[in-house]
Image: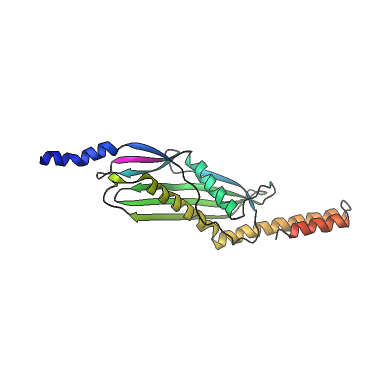
Amino acid sequence: MKNRLALIPLLLISISGCSTHMTKVDYEGAGSTYHDNPSSINNVVVTDQRGTDSNWLGAIRGGYGNVLKTLKTEQSTDIVVDKMYTDALSKSGILSDSKDAPYELRVVITKYDCSYYFNREAHAHVDISLVDNRSSVSKFSKVYKSDETEGGVGAGIFGDVDTLRLLAEATMSKTIDKMLDDPEFIKALNSGVSVGVSDRLNQLESLYKDGHISEKEYKEKREEILTEL
């Protein structure tokens, strides 16, 4: 009888084990409203440097550390994170569809995963660069990290995939919001837009002085540019 009871945990592991779950991860952050000059980034480029499978997200593990349930993103993680950043920039009013926008945002994923063994954990580490579209020079770069832990109940034999997925989603969203709310990032972003507006005003004035546009056209266009400030 004792031997049969001892086999129960192994049977539970066998019944629940080794399954793969394709998961969807979205940006669920708050966005930001601290930016004085909107619509300044027109492209996001994400590179995955984790050294894992392209759509690896994490795993739920049993009492011996054995993998019971594997979590993978429906698309490759670079595409998923690209969409998260794009949604965050759009929600914050920073994303532009203009080819003349001053900046491109480059994101390098160095760590993004989740696990449930005795506790639930999720990690999101990224290297961010704000690159000038005209000169291809980085105007701002910084590393942002979020490491979240939640208490679990024993080993992850009965771990819920969606609960762990939500933790991974919240952790990357938190990392994105750290960038959006960073005063240094905001300063670089707003400075870039101001320079862009200044250049456009100078070009407009040159066109007017050289007689290529009328005074009425000059004033109307100048007013249009100034409304972006």
Q: Residue at x 35, y 47 (%)?
A: 115
Q: Residue at x 79, y 54 (%)?
A: 203
Q: Nearer the viewer, residue 178 or 210?
A: 178
Q: Position of residue 179 (x, y in %)?
A: 53, 57
Q: Position of residue 118 (x, y in %)?
A: 29, 51
How many numbered tags mark residues here? 0
Quarter occupied by the C terminus: bottom right
Q: Is residue 172 above or below residue 59?
A: below
Q: Residue at x 14, y 38 (%)?
A: 4
Q: Position of residue 42 (x, y in %)?
A: 63, 48
User: In the image, which residues are magenta?
Assistant: 63-71
Quarter occupied by the N terminus: top left
Find the residue positioned furthest to the left. Answer: 1
Residue 64 included in the magenta stretch of the image: yes
As drawn, is 39 to the left or to the right of 51?
right
Q: Nearer the viewer, residue 144 or 18?
A: 18
Residue 95 included in the magenta stretch of the image: no
As drawn, is 221 to the left or to the right of 155?
right
Q: Nearer the viewer, residue 127 or 193?
A: 193
As drawn, is 85 to the left or to the right of 19?
right
Q: Position of residue 94 (x, y in %)?
A: 62, 54
As drawn, is 184 to the left or to the right of 22?
right
Q: Nearer the viewer, residue 64 or 134?
A: 64
